[in-house]
Image: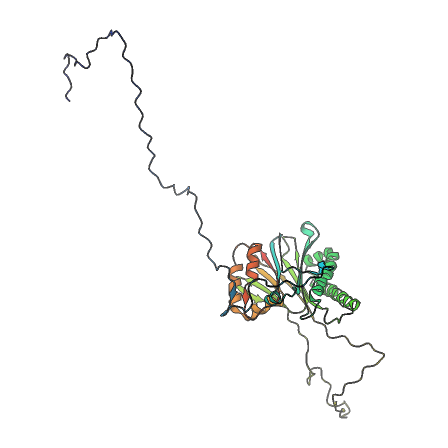
Amino acid sequence: MAESPQGAAPSAAAAEPATAAFPAVAGPPPTPPPPTEPPPTEPPPDNPGPRIEPPATGPRPRGHVGSRPPTYDAEPTALPPADPDDLDDLVADTVLDGARYGSCTLRAVSLRGDSARYRGEPRRDSLLTARFGTGEQALLLVAMATGARATPGAHRAAAEACHWIGRAVGRSHTRLVEDIRAGRRGDLKSGLHRLTDRSLGKLRASAAEQGVDPEEYAAGLRCLLLPADPECRTRVFFGVGPGGLFRLREGEWQDIEPQVTDVRGEPVLGFGSPPSETPEGDRLTMDLGIPTPPSPYEPAPEPPREPFRFRTSVARPGDTLLMCSSGLADPLRGEPELCEYLADRWSRPEPPGLAAFLADSQVRVKGYADDRTAAAVWEA
């Protein structure tokens, strides 16, 4: 609409006298328009918003590896029989433990094998984890023992072996920590050999007190010493009997079980066998292989004992050290797929939690149904 020229008369709608009888009533204020949200903008590159990390890629926990599933069920079936007057003799199906000291994280587990779970037999493996001392002077001990197969007191013998070696190490832990820090390998080997012999000697004495054959009331023993001092990365393994000691370094397993170099079998010429004749040229009498009757004045010879095993190693950041009984060592050596699976699971930046470690340790392999006991150490 065109504007009115100057001096034109106001329109009727606007021509109200200035002195009206009643003042004009003001209407309600106009409603303001609703606020409009600014259009979404991308956060500046230097200040990114919250972000959801995708789950870490890696193999999912598995029940078994290999071409075929194991024969036995994956879960326990039967409980061992119980004596109402000796309930302390009962052994749990599974024991799980863990800790973090210095530069290392420890995970340990002992679980009943598939065969024992099905037959209602107690776990023959025993596990002991203990800390002696405080602060950087502390020493961690992991001891595991396996009782003799098909003997009624195997689980008691294994527990007693762990008890005796734990007491011996605990009473000597101050000297052991000093030797480990100073790198006195010879003193460590001889001292731990004596402690092990004394502990297993007490086990044989306990068998005699019970009127049990010492061969039936026996146990293999494997131990690991870990100083709590973060500046000391020396790890000490010692023990007797079968099992495994492995190191996971840069995604590859290394079998570092100490090899025992003992002479077995009959003497051979040039290596411990007697000469065929005397220096004078006389031929020696032929040995017909007739055993000499034992003398009544000499004690009966003891059966041959298991050789002592000892190894010290310096850990590197990122290493994983695994000590285990034969129940896990045998499938690790016999089933490559289990090695690959555990290498993938245990090569991650952070150590697994207790539940994850238990799940990994009980991955089954057909043909291996014994108890499993394992202790793994992750180096920060």
Q: Residue furthest front?
A: 84
Please state if 22 lies on the left or on the right of 139 as rendered.
left
Answer yes or no: is residue 353 visible.
yes
Q: Which of the pair 257/210 is nearer the observer?
A: 210
Q: Can you give x and y, in whole percent of width and height, for residue 168 in the image?
A: 74, 60
Q: Can you give x and y, in whole percent of width and height, for residue 354 in the image?
A: 58, 55
* Vertical position of residue 28 compared to residue 338: above or below: above
Answer yes or no: is residue 256 visible.
no
* Vertical position of residue 22 compared to residue 29: above or below: above
Quadrant assignment for the N terminus? top left
Please state if 118 lies on the left or on the right of 12 as rendered.
right
Please state if 283 lies on the left or on the right of 54 as rendered.
right
- Residue in the image at 76% along x and 88% along y: 290
Q: Which of the pair 131/312 is nearer the observer?
A: 131
Q: Which of the pair 139/229 is nearer the observer?
A: 139
Q: Can you give x and y, in whole percent of width and height, for residue 220 in the image?
A: 68, 67
- Residue in the image at 72% along x and 71% along y: 216
